[in-house]
Image (cartoon, grey):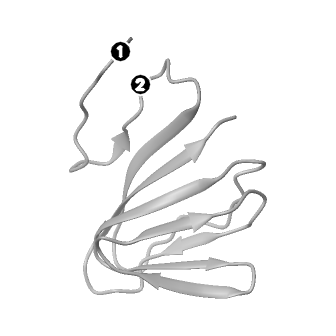
Amino acid sequence: MSIEVRSVHEPGWLTPSHAQRIRSQMVRLHPGEESGRHTTTQREEVLLVLKGTATVQGKGGSVVALPGSAVYIAPEIEHNVQNQGPEDLEYVYVVALH
């Protein structure tokens, strides 16, 4: 069994390379930046907003998520995370691998 602690205050991978069922990363987007449209094929994803305001565009529209919010994204849904606010956006994503 392995237990590891990683900081969510700097961008980078939060899960260790040997993780088998999830992948997680802290992301920082400056004002005007975006993640780019992508799909987590056959995988569920959760975004946890730490700082700033996330605009998450997906099938059928967009949602705005504030700090302390969690956004669920179903498998096969093309989506994009945008920072349309005046400050840096920091969020953690967690993706199921199986």
- Say whether disc 1 or disc 2 marks the residue closer to the N-terminus: 1
Amino acid identity at mark 1: Ser
Q: Nearer the viewer, residue 36 or 66?
A: 66
Q: Callout 1: 10 Å neighbours few (<14), some, many (20+)? A: few
Q: Quadrant of residue 68?
A: bottom left
Q: Quadrant of residue 83?
A: bottom left
Q: Name the residue beneath numbered marker 2.
A: 16
Look at 35% across and 79% down and name the residue there: 31
Look at 50% across and 24% down and name the residue there: 19
Q: Callout 2: 10 Å neighbours few (<14), some, many (20+)? A: some
Q: Is residue 49 left or right of residue 56?
A: left
Question: In the rendered view of the protein, which quadrant contains the C terminus?
Answer: top right
Q: Name the residue beneath numbered marker 1.
A: 2
Q: Is residue 6 above or below residue 43?
A: above
Q: CA distance from mark 1 to mark 2?
A: 10 Å
Q: Quadrant of residue 92?
A: bottom left
Q: Are marks 1 and 2 in contact (CB under 8 Å)?
A: yes
Look at 37% across and 72% down and name the residue there: 69
Q: Nearer the viewer, residue 62 or 32?
A: 62
Q: Is residue 37 above or below residue 5?
A: below
Question: In the rendered view of the protein, which quadrant contains the N terminus?
Answer: top left
Which callout, 1 or 2, points to the residue nearer the camera?
1
Amino acid identity at mark 2: Pro
Q: Is residue 57 left or right of residue 98?
A: left
Helix, strand or loop at mark 1: loop
Percent from the top left, x then y, of residue 45? 59, 55
Percent from the top left, x then y, of residue 17? 47, 22
Percent from the top left, x then y, of residue 89? 33, 70
Helix, strand or loop at mark 2: loop
